Image (cartoon, grey):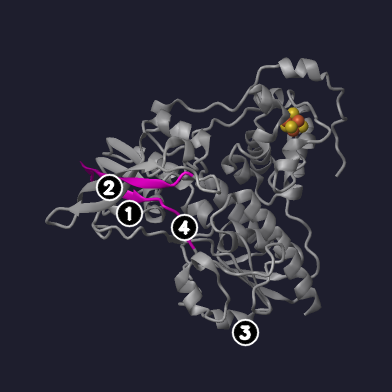
Amino acid sequence: MADKAPKPKIDRKARVQKPPHHARIRPPRARVRDFEEVVIPYTREEAMLEASRCLQCAAAPCQAACPLDNDIPRALRLIEAGEIVPAAAVYRATSVMPEICGRICPQTLCMEACTLHRMGKPIDTRRLEAFAADTQRETVRVPHPTLPAPTGKRVAVVGAGPAGLTVSEHLTRRGHTVVAYEKRPHPGGLLRYGIPRFKLNREVVAAKVTWLEQLGVKFRCNTTVGRDVTFDELREQYDAVFIGIGTPQDFSPGIEGEELAGVYTATEFLVRGNEPDPDPSFKVGPRVHVLGGGDTAIDCLRTALRLPGVTDVTCYYRRSEAEMPAHEQDYHYALEEGARFEWLACPTHFWGDDAGRLRAATYQRMELCEPDESGRFWPVPIPEATFTVEVNTVVLALGYRGDAAFNRRAPELETKWHHLIKVDDEATGRTNLPGVFAAGDVVRGADLLAPTIATAAQVAGVMDAYLQKK
Ligand code: SF4
């Protein structure tokens, strides 16, 4: 693609002095009252100003850190010149969903790799990506590619989440017929049901799905493979099968009282809590505890804070703040919005009332032992140090596993730890069954979006080669 913006002469010293114009964030007190996105989108002028700080580094560490190899310096050069739609095309050359990556990628990838990060003012690469992609979609629309002649080959995609959508797009672009099976009412998987609306609004996901439908991808929603159609039927009816079902099973800690009304898994809590009209049986608060220290726990805390009737939201984590795996920015947002954190506390018992509703939780105080050879500080209980607090809702955000029920219905498929699917190599996605491929969280365990769509795109290439030879 021709770069319309000539490479400008860069006065790096002058650019380093420029103040950052990062995307603005809605004030905590305003944003916590609703589910609207917390980040205020860039205006054209703001985006051009921010892009004009880019040093156009020869080695492009931002691009090197991007799992999708987005040509960030080139896109920023175009944004700086006001060529927003061509900039979007640069992102779309390597990413199937830049408007989504620009919203939910953590700052630890391109932004922390940015040369200017060392000076505490990295370029707001993610929000510029979202801005360019949104502008294209909302103004001239995202163009559909000219498809090659149909190959006559048919592919079943199981799971219409990030990996499934990526494979569906790449294989349709190569002339294959793709039918994506999704157990939930709408495609999108984690993007539609796992990421809170205040981080990724549903219109963006719906627009991507509509675009794929117009491209030719067929979605069969409310269809569970293994129940409504068998895995063997898919193998018989299609030339290849792709499995991208993610890690839909929440880890259960096996604590007494876990079955009480008011104890939710993170998946159920995020799905129901982010519905625009939650059903009346979804009762939350006033006191909410979220257990866990990862990004999902933070998403649950921030969702709880937005729900009516909730007055007190606390995260309980068995290690200390320093070990918490959640990304720093979202942790900071949660603190701003009013979440509290109780470190070195591990749940041991949930207590219910006569009606079987949660009323209290007991926690064990922990301390960190000396680091083991891997450098990890393991939490160990402090003898006889427990405490019990009143609580109405507990959310278990302790990690995810693969889909054991799916695996049982596909017994010939080789699996590995945590019910994940075994492949010969993540880059090929080949399972032990001929013509069956897998990628994304179902292979790697819960991961970030960008690496997932990067490997799914690679696997789509391998599947295409397989289909061409078939
Ligand atoms: Fe621009 Fe930062 Fe990338 Fe350098 S590392 S090219 S300053 S975005």
User: Spatial distance from mark 1 to mark 4, Cα to Cα?
Assistant: 14 Å
With 162 as the anchor, is 172 left or right in this view?
right
Residue 394 percent across, percent down from the top left: 30, 48
Question: Is mark 2 in CB contact (under 8 Å) with mark 3?
Answer: no
Question: Is mark 2 in CB contact (under 8 Å) with mark 1?
Answer: yes
User: Spatial distance from mark 2 to mark 1, Cα to Cα?
Assistant: 8 Å
- Mark 4, Cα crowd under 10 Å, few <14 / some 14-19 / many 20+, is many
Q: Which residues are magenta?
A: 377-401
Tell me the SS state at disc 3: helix
User: Spatial distance from mark 4 to mark 3, Cα to Cα?
Assistant: 31 Å
User: Spatial distance from mark 4 to mark 2, Cα to Cα?
Assistant: 20 Å
Give whichever of discs 1 and 4 has the lower sequence position: 1
Q: Main secondary structure of the magenta part?
A: strand
In the rendered structure, find residue 393 and report the number of the disc placed on it.
2
Q: Nearer the viewer, mark 2 or mark 3?
A: 2
Tell me the SS state at disc 1: strand
In the rendered structure, find residue 264 and report the number of the disc placed on it.
1
Give whichever of discs 1 and 3 has the lower sequence position: 3
